[in-house]
Image (cartoon, grey):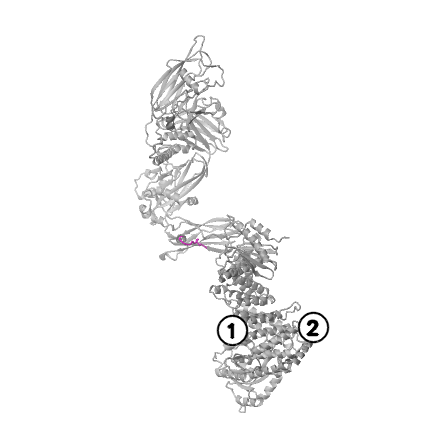
Amino acid sequence: MEFRTQTLEAISPVVMVVASPEAEAICQSQNGLTVTDLLRPYGFFHHLSVPVRTVGEHSYRIKELRLRFYEASAIYQPAPKVAEDHLCAVLSNAATDVSHAPDLLAALKKGEVPDALPWFKHYREEYMRMLRFSEHETFDHPVACLLVLSASEPNVVQAAEEMFQTMTLPPALRDSSSQATLLRHHVLLADDRPQPATSPDEKLPEGKLAEMKEGLGDAACSLVRINSGDKDKRSGLAGLWHSQIRSPVEGGGAGEPASKPAMPEQGYGAALSVSDVDGLKRSLEDFAVRALIPHLEMRVRNLSQQVALTRKGFKNQIKTLLWRNRSATSAAILSSATSNGADVPATPLRTPRATTTGVFSGLSGSQAQLRQLADTAFLVQDFQTAASTLRTLAVDYRSEGLWHSYASVQELLGLASFMIGASMQEVMTHFKEAFHRFSPQERDPSRDGIRYATRSMLLLAQYASLHGQWSEAHQGLMRAHLQEEDGRAAVLLEQAALCLLHKQPPNLRRFSFHFVLAGLRYNSCNLRNLGRHAYRQVVWLYEGRHWAFIEEHLHDVLGKQSKAAGDLHGAVRHFLAMLPCPRSSPSWQSFYLRQFLDAATQLAANSPEELGPLDLPLPAVNIRNPQVFYDNQTCHANGAARAVPAAYWRRLESLLLPGGDAGQNWLDSGSKTNLASLHNEVCVAGEAVTVAVQLSNPLGIPLVISRLSILAQLQQPEEQEGADGSILAEEVEVTLAAGEAREVRLQLRPLVPGTLTLRGITWTLSDIARGERLFKLKAASGRRATRDQSRQAKLVFKVIPSAPLLQVELLGLPRTVAEGALVEGQLRLSSRGGSVSGIRMLSAEPDLLLDPSAQPDGVHEASAAARDQTAQAESTASIGLPQANVPCKGQAFMSSWGPDFCVDGQSGPCSWPMRFHPRQPGRCLLHLLWYFEPRAGEDLRFRMLRMVHEVEVLPSLCCQAQLIPAPDDLQSYLLRLQVDSRQEAESTQLEELVCRSPGWKLEPLASAASPSLSDPAASAHSPPSSANSSTEVHGAHSSLLQQSPDCSIAQLQQPLPAKLQALLYFRLHPPLHPTPDQSKPDLGQQADAAARFHLQGQQMRHAKAQAVFEKQQAGQPKSKHKPQQDPVGAEQKQHASGSTPPAAAAAAIAPDPSQRWAGGAPDLSLHWHLSSQHLHGCHHLYKCWPKGEAGVQMLLKGPAQVQHDFAAQPLCRVRLQLSLRNFLSGDVTAEATFGAAASDAARASWSTPGPASSDLPACHSHVWSGRKRAHIDTLPSGAINHKTTEVLLSSEGMHNLQDYQVKVKDGLLLISGTRGLNDAFPDFTGKRQQLRQERQEFNFHREIRLPADASTASGHVHAKVVEGVLEVTVDKVWGPQASDRVDVQF
Amino acid sequence: MVLVCASVVGRANNPLYFRSFLPGGDAEILKFQYIVHCALDAVEEKVTAPQRRSGAAVESYLGLLYPTEDYRVYGYISNTRIKLMLIVDDHMARDEEMRQVFKKFHQAYVDAASNPFYTANTPLTSKRFDSTVTAMLTPRT
């Protein structure tokens, strides 16, 4: 509705209706309407064209006119308190049902914004109504009086006169002058109902009208007929009155009587016909046009003349000035006069005024005339006159400081300015000025004007909003709300907030804040429904935007109010939203949780069906990334098996599957058996689908979560629909500590085939609130979207019918075991859901071997059924392990049972013995992969079972073997075995040392009963101190020796205490003759478990070394300049350098094609026993190469101590034997020189130190006898040559035989040297290239003291050339120093 | 000039940092959150209005955003659309003075956001930033 229309409707002539009781009865009995209500819809005339001329020369035309009809008794303003109560009741009525209020969120989404809330329009109208009929606003005063009489009145003229004289005048008309200006009109109301019996002398209504016209005047009378319609038929006019009938104020007033007739069942105006309505309308129009407008026109002229008389001209101006001064102390009506309502005295009060603020002026005097003139001119639509008069009046009031009157004038001036088309700014300025002057001032703190001030702002807001000035409207309403009481302030705030939404861009945040403030105000005045509505409208604006305090505040208020209002569902919803509050203290968090649970409990008790699954934020669930584990063709025995990367398992599966090696892609492998593996989303009925979900507790208090399970749906094929209990979901209980995050694995078993969809998880918080979250996999944009769609599909499974499943248990395997231990265990096989056959096992680690020789327990029974079905005569041998521990690629071993071996779920499990032998300390993961073929079910032809068993391997012993050429023998070696105990407390019983290389013979040197023990920490870098004594090495003879063709065993039977070290010395005799090339021994042929594992280790080393060698060959096929490096040389070098661990170094060695030992380097096993654990074990030492092996070895043998009687024989002849052995791959020539030539050469390069300490004096008086030079033309590879010589000694003492020299020539290379006893030439095989260029001769000398017991002194030399420097390291096997290091520059 | 609240608001108009310098507890913070939240409307108006007019660049310092009865909210916007806001309990604050304060505030934010362990547009929990802001904005006696 336009503002103009509203203004014309609000300020229109008021007609006072006085009806006789009979007239009221005629109207009310049939129509449920008072006479006033009957007239109201017909007080609007919109097709008029009435010429009017008021004060100006020119006339204008009134084209539409409204009349306001009020009962005479109700034309007064109710007391402020009554009015406030009425307005509160209006809001309370609105608050009873807010369901019809628009949902702003939905409206905003549609781009629509309501201009006002539904209750605001009604509230505004009622508010305006409560402020009508004030004393100072004469446009609300009646301008005409309508006397309504019944046509049945016998004497209508007299009755009319009596009514006029006795009627109750409204307070504004109690002044006689006002009464005199009232227009009087008479209406004769005729009841057109068929009268039961009419007396013949009774006149017709027309007769009465004529009588009335005769007595009261022709124009002042009219006849209205009603009730001509059929009451039982609805006339369709009822809607006309609904908008016109206002609820009465308590005690009456504001235009409505204290009580009104109730609406009849037939509706208002049931007995009115169209002709009645037309007659009524015509009569009222006649009244308005012929009587009222001329009356008002005349009144304006009169008032204008009076004003002109009193105000124009110099004389009057002086009078006015004087009057003003006088009136400053004269009477005025206090503002309280407007609040007296019905008790307002008949004449206005004229009491002296102390102050000039905050009061309305009286209605007498020139200012009252001006106001009446302005109001009447406004009523008669002469807005120019009204505006000019009001401006004059405003100046008067302003100069006198009558601010309320001034404000009232400004308000009307605003409306008049609008009607004459003034600028918007001017109109709004008038309203603002009115607001400002109505508002309580500092000097006048009374709150009387606030209601009028608010009305001004409501007018301003309406005007501004209708003209698109939303900011002005918002500001006006905000200014008004500040000084208003709570209920009205809330309404104004809401309206101001809506104005913000119309701004561009919409001020959503300010809007929401205003609504929050409005909610607060509503709550303050106990209008909680409206408060709740206000909060609800804006809570969505804050949700999820991390304004935590605001969210918490809103939900807290809403939750409590909902609970108080009995809306438990809403309370639960809002308390729920408060739960995730990590920034609150634990006590508050606990309170919030309790509050929520209480509400949920109450709701569950009242209406359980309403407490459905909630979107509980506690605990926090990662719904974006659930991990799903399930078995189809591939099964997992335990969680550890799932933790292993799938690629690892696939590599193992390629070894186990029948066509795994052949095909590299799905086309090659191409059988339909792999089709199931292509569809990963297949799972098997009856088998578990596990979902791992991340749960976390964001609070500082523990959370108890029970009945946590998967939410899933199984859609069965059509023919099987209807079966119940098709899913078995496991329910778990979890308690999450404060701040804890945990992965929870939930299981689900589809019991029948179909399509399984995993939807989410569900749980119960604190055994009260049921929550659920649906999975929402992480979405991605762009090219990844497709992949994520497939991820989403991972939650959908095709469930195929159940298939038998093999179950494997490893019995007897401890969780912790010592390194090298030999553990006996059992492999228990059983099946679930049917029988399986074709079983194959792949062990990825060599530490677990099946015992092929043992007969399994229960196998007869287990396979009985299979035998019965196949053949009765089948031998039991085929039921066992036809293939056990067959090496595969890498370190894997495969065992397969026969095709007829069948494990049946009904006949119980069967067990197989197995051995476990961990050879590396640390965490040992046993990866076992099983292949089996279910005997039932067509969907899966075979299945794979993955299992992982974890064993922690503790270190037990550390063995290091060192092979040294024997000092007294060019053919045998000394074995130095260093055993460190790494046990924490227990002593280890060393049982025996076994040499498992064929042909080698083991001979103990040190006493096994007393090996040298030392603390390894103290002697890590030096031999044990007791090693100084040679008795260790050459100690008592050993224990029992067991020699066999395959192995040689030395019994030890010696305890090794914890954390100590033992040194054991043995002599090793290599095989004299090359052993025949044996075929590869089979693991199954070894009865002893230790031997089996030893052999397994050998095979693995062999395979690995072969692979490395082949790789090297493949990588360097065309390297011409690089010397050919045979595997033996590589093995020796690696072994001597010690840079690689023994096992790794040994593993890198190529097969031994050594010229030296046909069977390769010796392999050893050290057996031990832990008595407390009844545990046997062994350590394996493979390929013990001599350290610092020489290319050509020589030995000058002779007695170390000779007793001679020089008195009897001046010369002592001592026989010496020089032995040379060629370890090189080619032939060499050698030349030995004894005597002066050699000694000169030696002296040239060496200064010979004297003996370090000796009982005998040093002596050089010896002479070589016989040939000074001995030639060995050809010393073949591996051959030994002996040369005998003699030395003559002429005196006693310590003779240092250093003057001999042996030259060895190997092809182009000439190596010569003077050697001590048993010194060896280095092997320069690897360095030939460099030495060939140098072609240098070198001599070196080594003095070795001959000990008393001779023949055992030995030195050891390593030599290598580094950048032209020959580095010679002299290493003693025993002696005071570990090694001497000499550098020779050449 | 008495600063009573400092806040950093992210690109999605989510609070990254909120600090009240009044000893009012949660009630004060709630009030200030409402005020700062409302002031975001003013920021949007100020940022979009010049572009409508001339396409000129928006100055970082936005000036007075939202006067309430007791406080005034001043704003500053960075190039990355991070909003810095200060609530002042002084109706006589001068623009030049506020501009300087905001520059320091912005520098402190830049330092904190340059931390390689800080994820952009997440709440600022840096104690150093907090202490810097506190030291910078606490009224000097």
Q: Earlier in the sequence, mark 1 or mark 2?
A: 1
Q: How many marks?
A: 2
Label 2 element class: loop
Q: Main secondary structure of the magenta part?
A: loop
Asked whether the viewer can see residue A252, the reply is no
Disc 2 residue type (three-letter): Ala
* Residue A1180 coordinates in the image, percent (x, y): 41, 31
Q: Secondary structure at mark 1?
A: loop
The disc at residue A354 is: 2
Q: Nearer the viewer, residue A76 or A307?
A: A307
Q: Which residues are magenta?
A: A774-783
The quarter of the rendered structure image containing the C terminus of chain A is top left
**The disc numbered 2 marks a residue on which chain?**
A
Disc 2 packing (10 Å; few <14; some 14–19; many ≥20): few
Chain containing the residue with disc 1: A
Question: Magenta stretch containing residue A1269, yes or no?
Answer: no
Q: Which residue is mark 1?
A: A2
Question: Would residue A872 appear left or right of A135 to someone viewing this image?
Answer: left
| Residue A777 is one of the magenta-drawn residues | yes
Residue A526 screen position, x and y as percent: 58, 65
Whether labels 1 and 2 belong to a single chain: the reply is yes
Residue extending furthest bottom? A201
Q: Crowding near pointer 1: few (<14 within 10 Å), some, many (20+)?
A: few
Name the spot of residue B127 as percent of width and height, x first.
56, 49
Q: Residue furthest top?
A: A1208
Q: Position of residue A608 (x, y in %)?
A: 50, 60
Whole-Å distance between the Cαs marked 1 and 2?
43 Å
Residue type at the position of mark 1: Glu
